[in-house]
Image: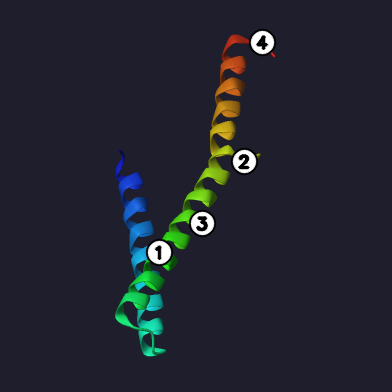
Amino acid sequence: MHTVQVLTLLLALSGALNIAFAAGLTARLAGAGPAQAILTAAGARTGWQQLRLAATAARRTGPWSRDDDRRERLRTASSAQTGTA
């Protein structure tokens, strides 16, 4: 894995843990028991990770995929070098 990929994963994990902590603390302060607060935090973390993964998958496979742009540039550069259209 590249450094950027590792840092992106760490950022996603950090965001998920912060959301889980906030949800668990809020549930606990609202009067939920420890088990309910833990389950609330786990549910919030799981939901955040699912949204993050869905957004990443949509960006990579959607109509504005970065891979498509790169392929287009490579094809254009290759055609310019060979003189074909």
The residue where tag 3 is placed is 51
User: Which of the two marks, 4 or 2, is nearer to us in this view?
Assistant: 2
Type of the residue with mark 3:
Leu
Image point (43%, 66%), residue name: 43
Type of the residue with mark 2:
Gly
Residue at mark 2 to residue at mark 1: CA–CA distance: 25 Å
Image point (54%, 33%), residue name: 67
Residue at mark 4 to residue at mark 2: CA–CA distance: 29 Å
The residue where tag 1 is placed is 45
Mark 1: few/some/many CA within 10 Å (<14, 14-19, 20+)? many
Disc 4 + disc 2, Cβ < 8 Å: no
Task: State which tag comes first along the sequence, 1 or 4.
Answer: 1
Type of the residue with mark 4:
Thr
Residue at mark 1 to residue at mark 3: CA–CA distance: 10 Å
> Image quarter for residue 3?
top left
The residue where tag 2 is placed is 62
Q: Position of residue 1 (x, y in %)?
A: 30, 38
Q: Secondary structure at mark 1?
A: helix
Residue at mark 2 to residue at mark 3: CA–CA distance: 15 Å
Position of the C terminus, as image quadrant, is top right
Task: State which tag comes first along the sequence, 2 or 3.
Answer: 3
> Image quarter for residue 45?
bottom left
Image point (37%, 52%), residue name: 8
Disc ID at residue 84? 4
Task: State which tag comes first along the sequence, 2 or 1.
Answer: 1
Q: Position of residue 48 (x, y in %)?
A: 46, 62
Judge by depth and name the residue closer to the eye, 48 or 66: 48
Task: State which tag comes first along the sequence, 4 or 2.
Answer: 2
Q: Secondary structure at mark 3?
A: helix
Type of the residue with mark 1:
Arg
Work out whether 74 lies above or below 17: above
Judge by depth and name the residue closer to the eye, 75 or 67: 67
